[in-house]
């Protein structure tokens, strides 16, 4: 990927519908943000409303939901709370957010759902949706649920719902993403099952160049 400040002026832009759906102006504006699509099973890196980079990902096999112990991917706005793995080799295994002596190799078959290479700890930003508890008092907190974006040993299933709640990436893509996003970068996980606001600000036109 080229320098983010010298992006391709012909890069595709977020549509007006997408900007409204996510209320992008409020959460990101013209800064850098990440959009994870459950429907498309992809992750997009966006700045100035332009899509700079798109890679396939894998969200939960059990669909979208935020409740504890459901193994679902939570919807809505998050932020990257912590980045782990700087300088580690591709295939580095992490347990409890710490690097181990284990290095996974492509083609190696293991029964576990491994957290590999780079880890992005997500923190929900919307109380009752992905932070704290919902209206029924059930925990929906993404940070408490240990929801991450991370490299995986199940790369053959990237591009289709197959995770246990986290957002899986190909290991090389996890390395590249790590180099471009900072702690605090907003992450939108689509869809968000709430009523859309009656009014939102559009930060840039759909044909932004």
Image (tube, rainbow, N blue to C red):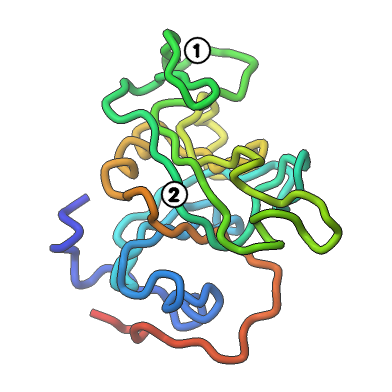
Q: Name the residue nearer the viewer: 171 or 24.
A: 24
Residue 98 is tagged as none
| Residue at 53% from the left image edge and 31% from the top image edge | 156
Looking at the picture, how far across and down is residue 66, in whole percent? 71, 52
Residue drawn 44% across the image and 49% down it:
80
x and y percentages locating residue 83 in the rendered image:
39, 38
The residue under the point 62% across, 19% down is: 112
For disc 1, the marked residue is 108
For mark 2, give the secondary structure: strand
Asked if residue 101 is positioned above or below residue 168 in the image, the reply reads above
55 up-or-down from 23: above or below? above
**Count of numbered labels shown in the rendering:** 2
Q: Secondary structure at mark 1?
A: loop
Q: What is the crowding at mark 1: few (fewer than 14 residues within 10 Å), some, or many (at least 20)?
A: few
Mark 1 or mark 2: whose residue is earlier in sequence: 2
- Which picture quadrant has residue 190? bottom right
Question: Residue 17, image x and y in percent?
Answer: 51, 81
Up/down of 94 relative to 137, above or below: above
Q: Position of residue 207 (x, y in %)?
A: 32, 84
Q: Nearer the viewer, residue 169 or 83?
A: 83
Q: Which residue is mark 2?
A: 80
Mark 1 and mark 2 in contact? Answer it, CB < 8 Å: no
């Amino acid at each position: 990927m080229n320098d983010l400040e010298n992006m391709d002026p012909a890069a595709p832009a977020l549509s007006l519908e997408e900007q409204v759906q996510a209320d992008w102006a409020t959460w990101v504006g013209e800064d850098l943000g990440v959009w994870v699509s459950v429907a498309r099973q992809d992750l997009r890196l966006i700045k100035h409303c332009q899509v700079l980079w798109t890679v396939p990902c894998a969200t939960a096999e059990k669909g979208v939901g935020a409740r504890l112990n459901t193994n679902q991917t939570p919807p809505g706005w998050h932020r990257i709370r912590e980045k782990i793995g700087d300088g580690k080799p591709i295939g580095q295994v992490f347990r409890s957010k710490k690097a181990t002596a284990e290095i996974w190799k492509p083609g190696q078959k293991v029964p576990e759902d491994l957290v590999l290479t780079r880890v992005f700890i997500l923190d929900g930003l919307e109380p009752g949706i992905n932070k704290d508890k919902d209206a029924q008092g059930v925990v929906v907190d993404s940070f408490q649920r240990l929801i991450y974006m991370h490299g995986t040993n199940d790369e053959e299933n990237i591009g289709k719902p197959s995770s246990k709640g986290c957002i899986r990436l190909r290991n090389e893509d996890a390395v590249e993403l790590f180099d471009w996003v900072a702690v605090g970068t907003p992450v939108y996980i689509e869809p968000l099952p709430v009523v859309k606001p009656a009014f939102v600000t559009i930060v840039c036109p759909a044909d932004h160049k």
